[in-house]
Image: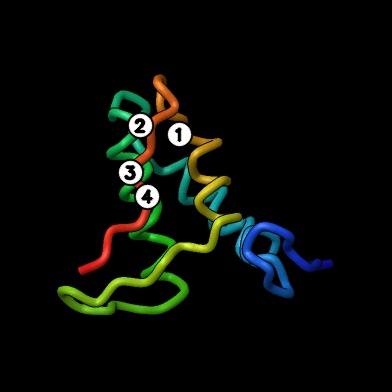
Amino acid sequence: MPTYCDLCESDPCHVEQFRDMLENLAGTFDEDSPPNISRRKMYQSYIRAVHGILGRGHRVVVPKCVAQFIRGVFPDPDGEYMGHRDS
């Protein structure tokens, strides 16, 4: 049952709501790809699945809980992450 998310302050939590999709997406990436490339593709796939194709220059902030989930699946060896970049 979806629950309130303390990270992104939404009800239901985006990770709980889309967990199956996120786990399936994570399993489709090449294990030899660098983690930053896999994270980027995962963010793009999540946004496309949830919001559709936005077009060039239109960006949506990934909820904190989803970003944390993706970073957990494809961690950076140095623990350094870029974060959201405005257009």
Place of residue 69 in the rendered image (x, y in percent of width and height, measured from the top left):
57, 46
| For the residues bearing labels 4 and 1, Cβ distance under 8 angstroms | no
Residue type indicated by callout 1: Phe
Give the residue at the far right of this rendering.
1
Which quadrant, please, contains the N terminus? bottom right
Residue type indicated by callout 3: Met
Asked whether, in this view, residue 25 is left or right of residue 16, the answer is left
| For the residues bearing labels 1 and 2, Cβ distance under 8 angstroms | yes
Q: Which residue lies at the image location 56% right of the left edge and 46% below the top edge?
A: 68
Label 4 vs 1, first from the N-terminus: 1
Depth check: give the residue in front, 79 or 16.
79
Residue type indicated by callout 4: Gly
The residues bearing labels 1 and 2 have C-alpha atoms spaced at a distance of 5 Å
Which residue is identified by label 3?
82
Q: Residues within 10 Å of mark 4 (few under 14, many from 20)?
A: few
Give the residue at the far top of this rendering.
77
Q: Residues within 10 Å of mark 3 (few under 14, many from 20)?
A: few
Q: Which residue lies at the image location 38% right of the left edge and 31% below the top edge?
A: 80
Which residue is identified by label 4?
83
The residues bearing labels 2 and 3 have C-alpha atoms spaced at a distance of 13 Å
Q: Which mark is residue 74?
A: 1
Q: Which mark is residue 18?
A: none
Label 3 vs 1, first from the N-terminus: 1
Q: Which mark is residue 35?
A: 2
